[in-house]
Image (spheres, rainbow, N blue to C red):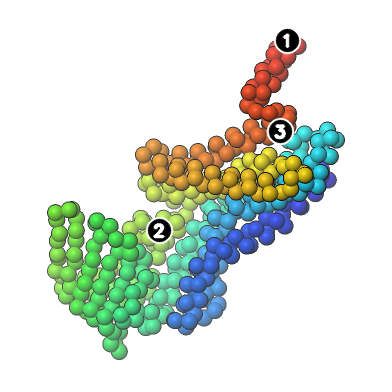
C-alpha cells in the first residue's frame, strides 16, 4: 500500500505540469482572438477571462490523453533508469502489482475526463455561445463595422458597405461561412439588426435584395425579395447543425438520438476520455527501458504510441459513415489489447507472442493434469 501511494504521488506532478503546458499551447489561438476583442472592440478584461474559462473544458478534453502519456513516460523511465524496477522485480513483485498505481491513475483520469467531456464541455460551449451573443447585443453599435467581414453570427459571414447614424445598414452581403454546392448567398440594398430580448436572439431585417442559389450543376436560381428576416440563436436554442454546433447539446439529449452527427458526437465524448486509460496501460509496459541506455527510448515509444493511436482514430473517423459509428471504439480496443498483451509478456518475461502461446498452453496442460 505504501509503494502504491508513493507511485501515485509521483505521477501527479508531471501530469499536472503537462496538462497546464499543453492546455496553454492549445488555447493560444483563442487567447489571441480574445486579445483582439479587447483591442479592437473595447471588451473588458473580466468578460474576456469569462469567455476563456468557458472554453477551458474543451481544451482540457483534448489535453488529457497527452498529459496522461507524458506522466507515465516520465514515471516509467525514472523507475527503469534508477534501477527501482529491477529491485522490485528482484523482490518478487509482479508487473501487475507494480502497475496497479498506473491502472488506478489511468482510471481516475478517465473518470475525470468523462465528467469533463459529458457535462462540463457542452455546458461550457453553451455558456460561451450565450455570452458571445450577449456581448454581441451590448456591442452592436461597434461590432457591425462597414467594409469589414463579420464572423460573429453562427455559421454566417456578414459584410456591410455602409452604416448610418441610425444603425441602418446599406449594401448588405450574407453567406455561409463554409461554402458548398448547396450554399445560399444573400445580397440586399439595406437592412437593420434588432435585438429580441424575449426570444434571446438577433433578428437581421433585409430589404430589397436577391438570394442566389446553386442547387445542381446545371441549376442556378435568383430569388428577389422585398423583405427577409434572419434569426441568429445561440447553440443551446439550435436543434441541429444548421443553426448551431452539436457540441453544445446536453449529453442526455443526444444519448439515444438517431441522427448520425449526434451519435458521432456522443462517441467522441466517450472515447476521448477512455483513451487516457488505454494509453496509460499500454505505456506502462512500453516505458520500461534498459537502465544503461537512458530515457530516450521511452520518450520515443511514447511518441510512436500517441501517433499510432490518432492515426487509427482518424481512420475510424473516416469509416464511421460507411460502417457504423461504433467503429470509433476501434483505436481504444486495439490499444487496450496491446497493453494487456505487453503487460502479460513482461510479467512472465516472454520474448514474443509464440512463446506466450506456449506458456499459456503449458499452464492449461498442467492445470488439466493436476486438476
Q: Closer to the N terminus: mark 1 or mark 2?
A: 2
Q: Which residue sits at x=45%, y=58%? A: 248
In the current view of this chain or complex, which residue is farthest to the top? 369
Mark 2 Cα-neighbour bin, 10 Å: few <14, some 14–19, many ≥20 = some
SS class, disc 2 = loop
Name the spot of residue 90 as percent of width and height, x first.
Answer: 84, 35
SS class, disc 1 = helix
Residue 233 vertical position relative to residue 97 in the rendered view, above or below: below
Name the spot of residue 62 as percent of width and height, x first.
Answer: 54, 55
Mark 1 Cα-neighbour bin, 10 Å: few <14, some 14–19, many ≥20 = few
How far is disc 2 from disc 3 in space, using C-alphas?
46 Å
Disc 1 versus disc 2: nearer the observer: 1
Q: Is residue 252 visible?
A: no
Marking on residue 369: 1
Marking on residue 346: 3
Name the spot of residue 177 as percent of width and height, x first.
Answer: 33, 64
Residue 80 vertical position relative to residue 115 in the rendered view, above or below: above
Q: Quadrant of residue 184?
A: bottom left
Quarter that holds the C terminus = top right
Residue 11 vertical position relative to residue 354 in the rendered view, above or below: below
In the current view of this chain or complex, which residue is farthest to the bottom? 165
Circle 2 residue? 245
CB contact under 8 Å: marks 2 and 3:
no
Q: Closer to the N terminus: mark 3 or mark 1?
A: 3
Is 200 on the left-hand or right-hand side of 280? left
Disc 3 versus disc 1: nearer the observer: 3
SS class, disc 3 = helix
Amino acid at each position: 500500500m505504501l509503494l502504491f501511494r508513493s507511485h501515485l504521488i509521483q505521477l501527479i506532478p508531471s501530469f499536472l505540469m503537462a496538462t497546464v503546458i499543453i492546455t496553454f499551447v492549445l488555447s493560444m489561438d483563442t487567447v489571441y482572438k480574445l486579445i483582439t476583442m479587447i483591442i479592437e472592440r473595447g471588451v473588458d478584461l473580466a468578460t474576456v477571462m469569462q469567455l476563456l474559462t468557458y472554453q477551458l473544458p474543451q481544451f482540457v478534453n483534448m489535453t488529457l490523453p497527452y498529459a496522461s502519456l507524458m506522466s507515465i513516460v516520465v514515471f516509467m523511465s525514472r523507475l527503469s533508469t534508477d534501477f527501482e524496477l529491477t529491485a522490485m522485480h528482484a523482490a518478487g513483485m509482479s508487473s501487475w502489482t507494480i502497475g496497479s498505481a498506473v491502472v488506478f491513475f489511468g482510471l481516475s483520469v478517465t473518470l475525470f475526463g468523462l465528467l469533463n467531456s459529458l457535462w462540463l464541455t457542452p455546458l461550457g460551449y453553451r455558456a460561451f455561445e450565450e455570452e458571445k451573443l450577449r456581448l454581441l447585443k451590448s456591442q452592436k453599435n461597434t461590432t457591425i463595422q462597414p467594409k469589414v467581414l463579420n464572423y460573429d453570427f453562427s455559421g454566417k459571414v456578414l459584410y456591410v458597405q455602409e452604416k448610418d447614424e441610425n444603425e441602418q445598414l446599406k449594401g448588405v452581403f450574407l453567406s455561409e461561412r463554409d461554402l458548398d454546392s448547396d450554399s445560399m448567398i444573400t445580397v440586399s440594398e439595406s437592412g437593420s439588426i434588432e435585438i429580441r430580448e424575449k426570444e434571446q436572439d438577433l433578428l437581421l431585417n433585409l430589404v430589397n435584395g436577391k438570394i442566389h442559389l446553386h442547387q445542381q450543376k446545371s441549376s442556378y436560381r435568383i430569388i428577389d425579395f422585398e423583405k427577409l428576416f434572419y434569426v441568429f440563436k445561440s447553440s443551446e436554442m439550435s436543434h441541429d447543425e444548421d443553426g448551431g454546433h452539436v457540441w453544445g447539446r446536453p449529453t442526455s439529449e443526444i444519448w439515444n438520438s438517431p441522427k448520425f452527427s449526434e451519435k458521432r458526437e456522443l462517441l467522441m465524448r466517450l472515447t476521448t476520455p477512455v483513451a487516457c486509460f488505454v494509453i496509460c496501460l499500454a505505456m506502462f509496459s512500453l516505458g520500461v527501458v534498459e537502465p544503461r541506455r537512458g530515457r530516450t527510448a521511452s520518450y520515443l515509444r511514447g511518441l510512436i504510441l500517441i501517433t499510432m493511436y490518432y492515426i487509427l482514430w482518424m481512420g475510424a473517423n473516416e469509416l464511421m459513415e460507411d460502417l457504423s459509428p461504433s467503429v470509433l471504439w476501434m483505436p481504444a480496443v486495439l490499444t487496450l489489447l496491446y497493453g494487456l498483451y505487453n503487460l502479460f509478456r513482461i510479467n512472465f518475461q516472454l520474448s514474443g507472442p509464440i512463446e506466450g502461446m506456449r506458456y499459456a498452453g503449458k499452464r492449461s496442460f498442467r492445470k488439466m493434469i493436476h486438476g
